[in-house]
Image: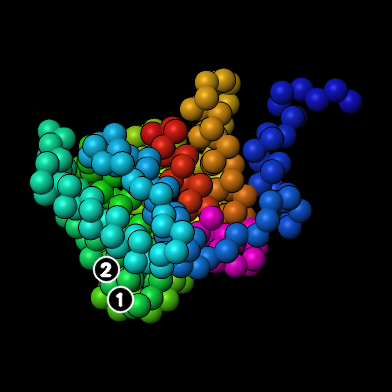
Amino acid sequence: MTKTPETTISTFTADAVAAGLSTYPHPKPVLHTGELAAAIRVQLRTWVPAELGFTVPAPELTADPADSIARVLGEITEHVQLYGADTGVNAEPWGLAHLFHAHADGLYAAQGRGDAYLLGALYSLIAARAHLRDHYEGRIELDPFGGHRPTVDDSALIETARVQLTTWVPETFGTIVQLPERWELHHAADMSDVLADVIGAGEAKYGDMDDDDSIRGMAHLANARAHGLKAGYGHGDAHLFAALNSLVLAAASLA
């Protein structure tokens, strides 16, 4: 039978279902210090050079990843203190507060207090980008994880991903996607359901577009959905982390 557009399964959806069934062909992601540090560098490169005029350096091959990130964040905050970050928006003070908070967390990570501080730095940088680049004027908690963060767990990853979505999905897709509050997400499966709604909205808005940003952004959303399904099926928190990384890249293309 010839499939009509109504019966053709979306490539993005099919890939996501395959991921949930453990047939997705990509290698399993990992979650450790080096990967967290790499994710921070990628996130920084999506906005810091354009907004702050600072070139994010490549990692030193022999340096400890946490030490290297702490130095980069220190250089960025020093650059901002010297040259400012005049974005002309009311959100600027909040953005700078999150940026300085990221530096503090980077220093804690470099002192050996745990990878959870690197995740905290990534969270703060997501918030800083939203305020300083996207002129987001909503309120984002400075430290939603509390002062004691011994491990990177599913709740911290879910909250970081949820906050990342709040910084761009409503503005990009409108009310078609209803993002939950923090207390409404308890498990990876809950985040997987949210990502299903996001990619559905993305397909509706960008599915017929053939420009590079739309194609690239939808590919990253598809990856986020795939990893969300893997996490929801119990394949590990590393898939939540991979979904978060894909959302960061999707926002860089679509927001």
Magenta part of the protein: which range? 230-242
Count neighbours of disc 2 (C-alpha within 10 A) and say few if under 14, some if 14 to 19, many if 20 or more. many
Is 158 located above or below residue 169 in the figure? below
Which residue is at the far right? 1
Residue under label 1: 111
The question of residue 156 being in magenta is answered with: no
Secondary structure at badge 1 equals loop
**Taking the image as drawn, is residue 98 in sight?**
no
83 or 195: nearer the viewer: 83
Secondary structure at badge 2 equals helix
177 or 167: nearer the viewer: 167
Alpha-carbon span between mark 1 and mark 2:
6 Å
At a point 23% along the width and 50% down the height, the residue shown is 76
At a point 30% along the width and 38% down the height, the residue shown is 49
Is 70 located above or below residue 45 in the figure? below
Residue under label 2: 107
Q: Quadrant of residue 178?
A: top left
Three-letter code for the amino acid on which mark 2 is drawn: Leu
In the picture provided, is 232 more to the left or to the right than 172? right
Question: Residue 108's x, y, as percent?
Answer: 28, 72
The question of residue 233 being in magenta is answered with: yes
Count neighbours of disc 1 (C-alpha within 10 A) and say few if under 14, some if 14 to 19, many if 20 or more. few
At a point 52% along the width and 53% down the height, the residue shown is 243
Q: Main secondary structure of the magenta part?
A: helix
Q: Quadrant of residue 120?
A: bottom left
In the picture provided, is 24 more to the left or to the right than 91? right
Q: Pointers 1 and 2 in contact (CB under 8 A)?
A: yes
At a point 65% along the width and 59% down the height, the residue shown is 28
**Taking the image as drawn, is residue 92 in sight?**
yes
Please give the label number shown on residue 29.
none
